[in-house]
Amino acid sequence: MRGSATDPTSTPGHRHLRRAAGPLASVALLVPLLGAAPAHGAADSSAGRLQEAFATAAADYHVPQSVLLAVSYLQSRWDRHAGAPSVSGGYGPMHLTDARTAIATTEHYAEGTEDARGDSARAAVRPDVEVPAESALPARLRTLPKAAELTGVPAERLRTDPAANVAGGAALLAAAQKQLGEPPSADPAEWYGAVARFSGADDSATAAAYADDVYDVLRSGEERVTDDGQLVALAAQPRLTADTAQLERAGLRTLPADGVECPRSVSCEAVWAPYAQFGNDDYGNHDLGDRPVSQRIKYIVIHDTEGAWDGVLNLIQDPTYVSWNYTIRSTDGLIAQHVKAKDVAWHAGNWDINARSVGIEHEGFLAAPDAWYTEAMYRASARLVRYLAAQYDIPLDRQHILGHDNVPGPTTSTIPGMHTDPGPYWDWRHYFQLLGHPFRKTAGKRSGLVTILPDYAANQPVYTGCTTKGEPCTVHGSSEVRLYTDHDVDAPLVKDIGLKTAPTTDVNDLSSRVSTGQQYAVADRWGDWTAIWYLGQKAWFENPRKQPTAVPARGAVITPRDGLASVPVYGRAYPEKEAYPADVPAQSVVPLPYTIPAGQAYVVGDEVPGEYYYAVTFTTDSHRVVVGKDLYYEIQYGHRVAFVRAADVTLEGSAD
C-alpha cells in the first residue's frame, strides 16, 4: 500500500502509513501468526484424501459435492496454506474466518518517510502512525466459530485439519440453505441463494457477484494440484442454470449506485475520498483533474493494503491521508471506489505515474506468504482491470499493468524509499489468465527477448525478512526469479546501485529479481542459464529446459543511438524547460544514477510525451497540463520500469 523506509530490511512488509488520526479500524488489522504455521506438506497428502473429504462432507450435510467444491475453489483454489490464515483471518480450503485468532502483531507499522504523491513541487507527506485497537468483528470475519457450533468440531481442528474444515464449510452452506427456507436439494441449481449467503456479503450485489463466480466455476469445471500435492477435480456442467431468484429471499441490502465506475459483472460501492482543505493552505487527499481529456490514463497500478478492510476504508476517508482509486475486499471481492478516474489519486510515490494511472488496492500483506489472496478477490480485480483497460485503451501487459514495486523512483534520492508491494507472492501468471491475456511463448527458441514465466507453485526461491526474528520466510510459490552476476547460484546477486546497499534475499529487496510477465532482451546463454540486460549490466537466471522460468518472446527494444557510449535513464517523463509557461515552475529533468551502455537493449512498453500536471493548490484555476516536444520511451529497465528520451535511442524490432 504505502510507504517505505530508508532501511528496506527494518520492517516486514516495507510499508509505512502516512498518518492515522485515531484507531485505524473498527476491525483490527490482520496478519498470519508468522512462523507459527506448520511447514507445507505436514498434513496427510495421500492422493485423493481431500477429494474424499469433499465427498464425505457433502453426504453428511446433504450439500451437492459440486457446489462444495466450487465454493472452496473460489475461496482458496482448494489450497490449505499450511494452516496459516489469510489476510482476513480465513483458514483452510473453505476459508473459514476466525479473525480474533489471527489478529496482527503491530510490527508492520513503524515510522517512515513515505510520500505517495511523489511531486517535489509540494512538500512531502510524513507519517505519524498509531497502532489500532482490536474491535468487534463483522459476521464475515467469524464464520469458523459458527462452523464449530454447527459441527461440534473444536475450532483448532477446523483451522488445521483440511477434512474438518471442508465439513465446516458444508455445515455453513446447509445452514444457509435452511435459513432461506430451501430444501437440501441434490440439484446444484437450487443452491444459489445459500452460496450467496456463504460469501458473508451484506449486500445483494456483492453476494450475487460471488455466487455468479461460483456458478461460473461449476459450469467450466476445474482441476489442479493443491499446495500440499493433492489432485482435486470438479467436472464441468456447462448447461447448469442457477435459480437466481433465491437471492430475493436473502434479505440483503441494495448498494446505492452513487456514480461508481465499475463493470456490471462486479459488486461496487462508493466510499469517496474527501477533497478537503485544511490548515496552512494544505489540502488532501487527491487532485481534481480532467482525465482522460487533458491526459491519457496509461497505467493501472496493483497495490496491497497492508491492512484489513475496515481500517483501510477509515484511512481513505481521512482528508489528511493519501488516496487511491479502488480497494478490493478479500472475503468476497467487493470493490469500493474512492477517487474518480478523471481525478489524480496519490498512490504511486511518483507524480508522473500518479498523473497517468489508476491505483487499485487489494486486501493483503506483502511479507506474509500465506496471507493469501482469495480467488474471489483475484477475479473481481481482473474484471475491474479489464473494464478500465477497455475504457482507457490500456494494453494488458506488464509494462502497463504495473505492480507498485514496478513504479520507478522519480529522482535519485527517492529510489531507496520506493514501494515493494504487492511483492513476490502475488500470482501474476494466474492474474493474467483471469485477464484473458495469459503469458505464453510468442517466438522461436533463439529469440532475442524472453518473457519471465516460472511455474508459480514450483518456483520457491528462499526469502528472508518476513518476521523480525530473522528466520527465512515460509517456503511458498512465487512469481519472481532471482538474478546472479554469473551462471552459478553461488555467484553474487546482481546489485542495484540506486539502492546504495548490498543485495540480499530480503522479501523487500528488489535488487536482483525479475517478475512473471516482465520482458527483457537476452544478453547471453550458458547451458540451463539465460542472461538478460538488467540495470545496465548482464544478469543471469536459471532457465532449465525441463522446468523453464522464461519463454521466448517478440517485441520492440531500444538501444543507444549510434555514436553514444551510453544514454541516461529517467524516473519520470517530464517536458523540456522551454515547454513551461511563465506561471508554471519548470520541473527539473534530471536522470537517475543509471545508464544504458552501448550494445545493450531494453524492451519498450510505450512511447509517451514529456508531460507534467501542475496541481499544487486546492482550487483548480491554476492547474495546468504542460506537454513538451520531447518524447520518451517507457522501458523495462530493472525490476522497475524507467524512461529514456527517444532522441537518445534507436527503436528496433526483436530478433526471432
Image (cartoon, rainbow, N blue to C red):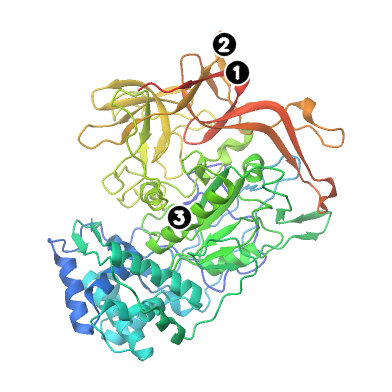
Q: Position of residue 167 (x, y in %)?
A: 24, 77
Does the image show residue 357?
Answer: yes
Query: Which quadrant of the structure image shows residue 296?
Result: top right
Task: Verify CB contact (< 8 Å) between mark 1 and mark 2.
Answer: yes
User: What residue is disc 1 on?
Assistant: 648
Q: Tag 1: residue type?
A: Asp
Tell whether 643 sits left or right of 577: left
User: What residue is disc 2 on?
Assistant: 564
Give the CA distance from mark 3 to mark 2: 42 Å
Query: Which quadrant of the structure image shows residue 339?
Result: bottom right
SS class, disc 1: helix
Q: Residues within 10 Å of mark 3 (few under 14, many from 20)?
A: some
Q: Nearer the viewer, residue 214 or 26?
A: 214
Task: Verify CB contact (< 8 Å) between mark 1 and mark 3.
Answer: no
- Vertical arrangement, residue 430 with respect to residue 654, above or below: below
Please tell me whether mark 3 or mark 2 is closer to you in this view.
Answer: 3
Q: Tag 2: residue type?
A: Leu
Q: Residues within 10 Å of mark 1 (few under 14, many from 20)?
A: some
SS class, disc 3: helix
SS class, disc 2: loop
- Earlier residue among tags 3 and 2: 3
User: What residue is disc 3 on?
Assistant: 382
Q: Position of residue 58 (x, y in %)?
A: 21, 78
Query: Which quadrant of the structure image shows residue 520?
Result: top left
The label shown at residue 269 is: none
Please tell me whether mark 1 or mark 3 is closer to you in this view.
Answer: 3
